Image (cartoon, rainbow, N blue to C red):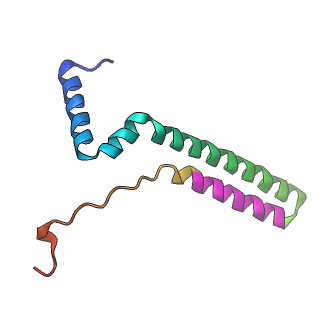
Amino acid sequence: MPLSDRERKQLEELEADLAADDPRLAQRLSSGSLKSRLKARMSIGALVCLIGLVVLIAGVSTQIVVVGVGGFLVMGAGAYLLVGAHSFRFPKSPKSPDSDPKG
């Protein structure tokens, strides 16, 4: 569904405000590098998680505890990569003069 003229104008104003407020962030978002890095990290995390699951099942089926525990740890690392791909770091907001505890 295409955007209306009013919505398109609002979007352009938001983009211009973002570029004025934080040009580095605007450049990173427009380049698409952030999106591709998140996609790559999620793909790697899913693959590592799948490998860990296979190793875990192999350890359980052969009744070798060390292999099963290793598979569980590898699967946990993959899940960490997969879930950690969604975390974003927000810049610290500047302190306002009203929030000064001494004043």
Number of marks in the rendered image: 0
> On the rendered structure, is 73 left or right of 82?
right
Q: Position of residue 62 (x, y in %)?
A: 89, 58
Q: Quadrant of residue 14?
A: top left
Query: On the rendered image, what quadrant is the C terminus found in?
Result: bottom left
42 drawn magenta: no
| Quarter occupied by residue 8 | top left
Residue for point 11% across, 69% down: 98
Q: Seen in the image, is 38 located left or right of residue 16?
A: right
In the image, is residue 68 part of the stretch drawn in magenta?
yes
Determine whether 95 is above or below 77 in the image: below
Residue 96: x and y in percent read: 15, 65
- Above or below residue 98? Residue 52 is above
Dominant SS of magenta comes to helix
**Quadrant occupied by the N terminus:** top left
Asked whether, in this view, residue 33 is left or right of residue 82, the answer is left
- Residue in the image at 58% along x and 42% along y: 40
96 or 67: which is nearer to us?
Answer: 96
Q: Residue at x 51, y 44 (%)?
A: 38
Classify 96 as above or below 3.
Answer: below
Instruction: Residue lying at the far bottom in this picture: please name it.
Output: 102
Q: Nearer the viewer, residue 66 or 60?
A: 66
Q: Residue at x 19, y 29 (%)?
A: 10
On screen, residue 17 versus residue 51, left or right, reads left
In the image, the segment drawn in magenta is 66-81
Q: Quadrant of residue 43?
A: top right
Residue 100 in the image: x percent, y percent?
15, 75
